[in-house]
Image (tube, rainbow, N blue to C red):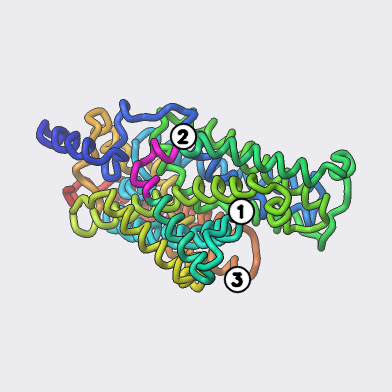
């Protein structure tokens, strides 16, 4: 049971940290459903989704592409809802939730570091796209020459960093404005592209490119957002309950995943190419600028946000210190911006993709530990009423780490041979293996490994 002094200290920290980086989100800080919904839609409803949909449309009929999108989206829906529901119930981010969902304090440090590196890396990659797009459409001056892109990359990188510093409310407010603008711009551009075509014919026409199998297409849909699905708790913790999380993920799927994909499928059929984004930019004028700005910012702000949460968790676990969230955001934002300006980040995309295979296995372990084994539920329940974190946590859970590595090996191996969905393969493998070893191990050793080890490290 937390003491009165501990509660006062936690409340004092919450005043300093408007986004509850290392604490539970209290009931009074929960956000309206629509705010978090717009963040979710913004994370899915982007240019990269249009590119994915165009690839499906180039190699599939409309209805086959619809089926592939539905199958891939259902898989993402389950993962997002399970982790998001746990986060809403406990008020914890993904990185912090891992401490009491199988990994322990040391494991959460490793996971937090991986999330921090991976997400700030993708922040840099997206900032490259943002800067290049702005330099192409809004030249600052003819005299800058090769400096055009670096200047824009600095502007865009710092702008997103400032937005993230202001926290989840600012991110939600931005998404509330720019998600509708993005959708309007896409619909308008699509109307221009499709004005000389019959929608009825496009729905039944054969794909213009080489055939794409249903399995490969489903893999593309699910694999494209698996890391984003696992980071759902970072904003779902601001919702009130699992029911709200369910509707957030469901609506986000239909508007972002299904809506954008099928728009792109029809346009790919209309122009006979998968390069629809370039055509949309060329035909929409100022709307093209809106598409670039709205799409990149509402996606990239969450990359930086999740990166800061991961790094804060890692620092806290390793050094028992609470780092200032704003300083972490500034540091990560500046690093990502500099890397994008120098172009170095382009050489790290394969490394970032490799890190992406490290993340999904954790989701399988978390879901099994929290919902099935329920090892930490008692201690989490005891401290939830006071709004503080449990005072005790496992240092390490070797079984979880072994299953994490096994899941990564499966994901990496299946990725190399092109079988199934690597991220989901690793997730399922790690989760099932963790459950089997924990249950069987308890019976063989006669040791209650299913019980949370309350004698481990005190926070």
* Mark 1, other Cα within 10 Å: few <14 / some 14–19 / many ≥20: some
Q: Which residue is mark 3?
A: 416
Query: Horizontal and vertical percent for residue 177?
Result: 52, 35
Give the residues drawn in magenta, as a range: 162-172
Task: Give the number of the disc on residue 48.
Answer: 1
**What secondary structure is the magenta-colored segment mainly?**
helix
Label 1 to label 2: alpha-carbon separation:
21 Å
Mark 1 or mark 2: whose residue is earlier in sequence: 2
User: Left or right: where does residue 177 sit relative to residue 338?
Assistant: right
Instruction: Determine which quarter of the picture holds residue 135.
Output: bottom right
The answer to whether the residue labelled 2 contacts the one labelled 3, judged by CB atoms less than 8 Å apart, is: no
Q: Which residue is mark 2?
A: 36
Query: Horizontal and vertical percent for residue 380?
Result: 29, 37
Mark 2 lies on a secondary structure that is helix
Give the answer, above or below, for where 451 lies relative to 144. above
Q: Between residues 55 and 451, which one lies in front from this camera angle?
A: 55
Mark 2 or mark 3: whose residue is earlier in sequence: 2
The answer to whether the residue labelled 1 contacts the one labelled 2, judged by CB atoms less than 8 Å apart, is: no
Q: Which label sits in the foreground, 2 or 3?
A: 2
Q: Does the segment drawn in magenta span residue 367?
A: no
Give the answer, above or below, for where 392 lies relative to 336. above
Q: Residue at x 51, y 40 (%)?
A: 40
């Amino acid at each position: 049971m937390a003491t009165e002094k501990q509660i006062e200290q936690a409340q004092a920290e919450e005043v300093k940290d408007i986004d509850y980086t290392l604490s539970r989100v209290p009931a009074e800080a929960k956000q309206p459903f629509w705010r978090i919904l717009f963040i979710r839609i913004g994370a899915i409803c982007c240019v990269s989704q249009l590119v994915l949909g165009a690839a499906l449309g180039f190699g599939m009929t409309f209805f086959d592409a619809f089926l592939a999108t539905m199958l891939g989206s259902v898989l993402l829906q389950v993962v997002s809802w399970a982790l998001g529901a746990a986060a809403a119930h406990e008020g914890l981010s993904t990185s912090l939730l891992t401490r009491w969902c199988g990994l322990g304090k040391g494991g959460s440090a490793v996971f937090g570091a991986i999330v921090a590196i991976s997400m700030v890396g993708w922040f840099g990659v997206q900032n490259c796209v943002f800067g290049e797009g702005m330099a192409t459409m809004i030249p600052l001056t003819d005299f800058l020459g090769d400096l055009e892109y670096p200047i824009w990359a600095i502007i865009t990188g710092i702008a997103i960093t400032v937005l993230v510093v202001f926290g989840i409310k600012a991110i939600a407010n931005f998404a509330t404005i720019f998600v509708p603008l993005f959708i309007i711009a896409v619909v308008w551009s699509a109307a221009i592209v499709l004005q000389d075509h019959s929608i009825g014919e496009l729905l039944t026409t054969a794909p213009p490119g080489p055939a794409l199998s249903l399995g490969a297409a489903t893999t593309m849909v699910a694999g494209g957002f698996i890391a984003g699905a696992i980071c759902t708790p970072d904003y779902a913790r601001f919702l009130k309950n699992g029911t709200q999380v369910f509707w957030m993920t469901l609506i986000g799927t239909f508007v972002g995943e299904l809506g954008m994909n099928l728009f792109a499928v029809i346009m790919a059929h209309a122009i006979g190419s998968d390069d629809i984004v370039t055509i949309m930019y060329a035909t929409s004028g100022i709307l093209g600028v809106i598409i670039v700005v709205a799409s990149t910012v509402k996606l990239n702000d969450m990359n930086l946000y999740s990166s800061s949460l991961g790094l804060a968790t890692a620092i806290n676990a390793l050094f028992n210190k609470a780092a200032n969230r704003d300083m972490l955001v500034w540091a990560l934002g500046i690093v990502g911006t500099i890397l994008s300006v120098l172009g170095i980040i382009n050489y790290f995309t394969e490394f970032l993709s490799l890190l992406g295979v490290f993340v999904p296995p954790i989701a399988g372990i978390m879901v099994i530990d929290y919902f099935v084994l329920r090892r930490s539920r008692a201690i989490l329940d005891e401290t939830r009423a006071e709004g503080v974190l449990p005072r005790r946590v496992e240092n390490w859970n070797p079984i979880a780490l072994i299953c994490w590595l096994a899941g990564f090996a499966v994901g990496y191996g299946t990725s190399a041979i092109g079988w199934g969905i690597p991220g989901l393969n690793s997730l399922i493998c790690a989760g099932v293996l963790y459950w089997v070893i924990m249950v069987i191990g308890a019976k063989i050793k006669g040791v209650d490994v299913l019980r949370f080890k309350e004698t481990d490290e005190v926070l």
